[in-house]
Amino acid sequence: MYTSETKIRVRYGETDQMGFLYYGNYALYYESGRAEAIRQLGFSYRQLEELGIHMPVVELQSNYYRPALYDDLITVKTILKELPEGSKIQFHSELYNESGQLLNKGVTTLVFYDPIAKAKVKMHPELMQRLEPFFQ
């Protein structure tokens, strides 16, 4: 299993009238967590794109337990529970407040996609090589 943590402070412009993180912004927090998880493996999304791999989202699930509030420092925990075998990869996200309370859980499914061939492809071998040690 591969796990990464990213800290994000809830900004005023991301909240609704109640001072809660607007529900649509959770997907942006998941994305920040994914991008940082990939960066911690030694890649950026830009580098993956330069290798000819894009990663569009094909499914998003989200469960809300407690609100994230304006100015809270949120920990976004990003987890890969399985090593991808085909073209799909699932990122599990958990958001916690500073007290360690679970606020939200989400699962984002992406596919590895070659924009020139216009087809799904398997994970790039370099990324696979960096992930494999976490699953042995």
Image (cartoon, rainbow, N blue to C red):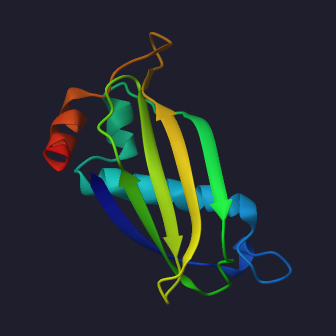
Percent coordinates x, y for residue 42 in the rendering: 22, 50
Residue positioned most to the right: 17
Number of callouts: 0
Up the image or down, 96 lies above or below 86; here it is: below
- Between 12 and 29, which is closer to the camera in this rendering? 29
Percent coordinates x, y for residue 101 in the rendering: 53, 82
Up the image or down, 18 lies above or below 120; here it is: below
Q: Residue at x 42, y 27 (%)?
A: 112
Q: Residue at x 27, y 46 (%)?
A: 43
Percent coordinates x, y for residue 2 in the rendering: 28, 53
Percent coordinates x, y for residue 39 in the rendering: 31, 54
The C terminus lies in quadrant: top left
Up the image or down, 6 lies above or below 51; here it is: below
Image quarter of residue 27 = bottom right
Image quarter of residue 6 = bottom left
Residue positioned most to the top: 117
Q: Residue at x 27, y 51 (%)?
A: 1
On screen, residue 111 versus residue 127, left or right, reads right
On screen, residue 86 versus residue 96, left or right, reads left
- Between 94 and 38, which is closer to the camera in this rendering? 94
On screen, residue 22 versus residue 4, left or right, reads right
Q: Residue at x 36, y 68 (%)?
A: 5
